[in-house]
Image (cartoon, rainbow, N blue to C red):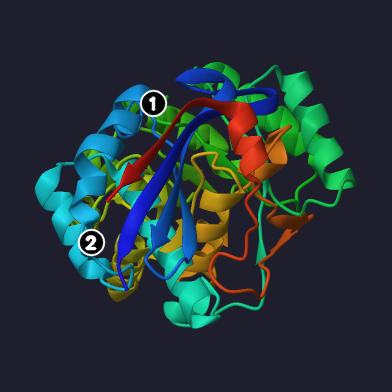
Amino acid sequence: MKIIRAEIWGIHLPLKEPFVVSYARFESMPSIILKLTTDTGHEGFGEAVPDEHVTGESFYGSYALLEKVILPQLKGLSPFQIEEVHHRMNLALKGNPSIKAAVDIACYDLMGKITGMPVYDLIGGKAHDSLSYPKVISIGSSEKMSEAALAALEGGYQHLKIKLSGDAVFDIQRLQAIRSAVGEDVPIRVDVNQGWGTYETAKRALAQCEDLNLDWVEQPLVPEAFAEMNELRGSTKTPLMLDESICSEIDLQRAINTRAADKINLKLMKSGGIYPVINMAKIAESAGLKCQIGSMVESSIGSAAGYHAAIARKNIETTELTGPLLFSEDPGNLTYKIPFVHLAEKPGLGVDVDEQVLEKLSECHKIVEV
């Protein structure tokens, strides 16, 4: 059984409303959808969401590299040869994890469909009965964010994830307003997306967070600041999570060696897909670190892949794969029933892909013989 054909769609997923983080404002999300076909007629789907701010990947550059560099590496391979697939991709191209993730996810979707098994059963089976997700609140005024938080709780959410701007003074005001609005018992997670910049700024901001009962603060500093993160951990009782700092096993080992984090946010798009992320989760577990599977705002395809990885590992305790809830159109049909996601007990990812939606959203489209 060999992979013989690939089909690529370059699309922009329309957001219901703009998504704002410390480093960017998004009106839509770039996505590259991949379909791999075997000589037995089986089809598997994968997704890449390139992000220039996190992995240095651009939409059009990633599309071209996937077509011209990565897909030729699949010649003669079965989707079950996932180790060899990654070996060849990594030899052919340094970095560029999101397009490698697209191939990886499509291979796992194929493996599941060929064997008649959900992806999670291929990587360890269910370690959790269910997975919940937070309401992610993007940056706005204190009043607007507080209103959004209250609306989320009224809508059935149990956890909140608050995006912050990087202006520490206003960020603390936002957090204080939200905590006052929702009460003391609602779990709140905070994501600074590198925005607090310097150690001293982050230290002052964290000191003002001490009485806000936060679950954790994510990525307050730039990705390279491992030593400073270790110092911050010693200055606060609030747990600290690393995200943008951790794209590879080497990054993770550095975080472990420097004791730079209490928790790790793993993402398929940062690290190359399900196979490397499962390996990283095992490394984190050996160091006593709990993990989360985070989101690059993927469609149902990439989000389902993340949930399969999360549900199969005990030390992956939280998720935030809420991209499909943010889109006005999605080529897949992952099922959300707030605050839980429901993975279909079907072969592969369990997601049905509507190729008519792909055609409608497509900016570029190509069929490649492998």
Q: Quadrant of the N terminus?
A: bottom left
Q: Which residue is mark 2?
A: 85
**Which amino acid, by three-letter code, is at mark 2?**
Val
Q: 353 or 296, which lies in front?
A: 353
In the image, 236: left or right of 287? right
- Image height of 369 relative to 4, above or below: above
In the image, 175: left or right of 197? right
Q: 95 or 265, which lies in front?
A: 95
- Image height of 249 relative to 368, above or below: below
Q: Which x, y percent locates residue 214? A: 59, 47
Q: Which x, y percent locates residue 252? A: 25, 55
Q: Quadrant of residue 143?
A: top right
In the image, 70: left or right of 32? left
Q: 12 or 287, which lies in front?
A: 12
Q: Pointer 2: residues within 10 angstroms few (<14), some, or many (20+)? A: many
Q: Which residue is mark 1?
A: 59
**Residue 209 visible (yes or no):** yes
Q: At numbered mark 2, what does the secondary structure look like: helix, strand or loop?
A: helix
- Image height of 22 relative to 116, above or below: above
